[in-house]
Amino acid sequence: MVIERPIGSDALLLRGGGPSRGHVISGGDAEDPRSLPMKATAKTVLDRLSPIAAASAGERPVLVEEFWVPESHERADLVAVAGEIWAFEIKSPRDSLARLPRQAAAFSRLFDRCVAVLATAHLGPGMKRVPPWWGVIDAGERDDDRLEWIRQPGPNPEVDLELLVKLLWKEEALAVAAELGIETSARASRHALWRRLLRDASPASLKVCVRSAVAGRNGSSARIPTRHWTTTRASPA
């Protein structure tokens, strides 16, 4: 426990062990525990995270909850799609870190930037489970704790294009091929279209087209909309 005594005050600020990170305990009567903020959940962290995610990826981002990752079938808690694709994975005080290494490996193949949003108690062990280019946000422990950047994310050094192209639905792959002047057939399978795009499109062009397709798609067209595609278009700043 780290105890900080503000200058000119008899109050104690307890971090990591008091009723809540950043709550002041004065010398008077103890607070009623029922009046203290509740321990944060992934949902309450997500509510506070959304504005940060929207401000991160670029202009007019689209926010996607429970973003499905091809092949591994992992899901990122929140993804912001605009000029880049940012993934945010939340580990609240109620969550375990057991899946984080597997999630980090999957997300590191796909997203332009990744951020681990960790409860204060998870910071030490959690930061050891993600690559050094990942960003880290301290989510606190309670519902009213502020989210604070510990480390900004760097660019992903190696996006796997074979995985990235699998985000495209067949109609989107056909549209991307047409936009890039790549000859295809409407009768081609989705896998054949992916292979053609990987062969004939430049990596930079393919990344731009996939981001555009993902940001512009209609979630109601998903085969399983409630699980595979839940979007929220962020309000312009």
Image (cartoon, rainbow, N blue to C red):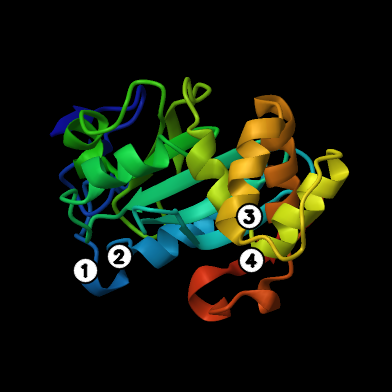
Q: Nearer the viewer, residue 138 or 109?
A: 109
Residue 4 % position (x, y):
25, 28
Is disc 4 in contact with disc 1, using a CB cutoff of under 8 Å? no
* Kind of residue at disc 4: Thr
* Image quarter (top left, top right, bottom left or bottom right) of the N terminus: top left
What secondary structure is marked by label 1?
helix
Is disc 1 in contact with disc 3, using a CB cutoff of under 8 Å? no
What secondary structure is marked by label 2?
loop
* C-alpha distance separating marks 4 and 3: 16 Å
* C-alpha distance separating marks 1 and 2: 5 Å
Q: Identify the residue position indicated by label 1 in the image.
A: 33
Circle 4 or circle 3, nearest the eye:
3
Q: Identify the residue position indicated by label 3 in the image.
A: 168
* C-alpha distance separating marks 4 and 1: 37 Å
Is disc 1 in contact with disc 2, using a CB cutoff of under 8 Å? yes
Q: Which label is found at residue 231?
A: 4
* Kind of residue at disc 1: Pro
Q: Which label is found at residue 36?
A: 2
* Kind of residue at disc 2: Leu
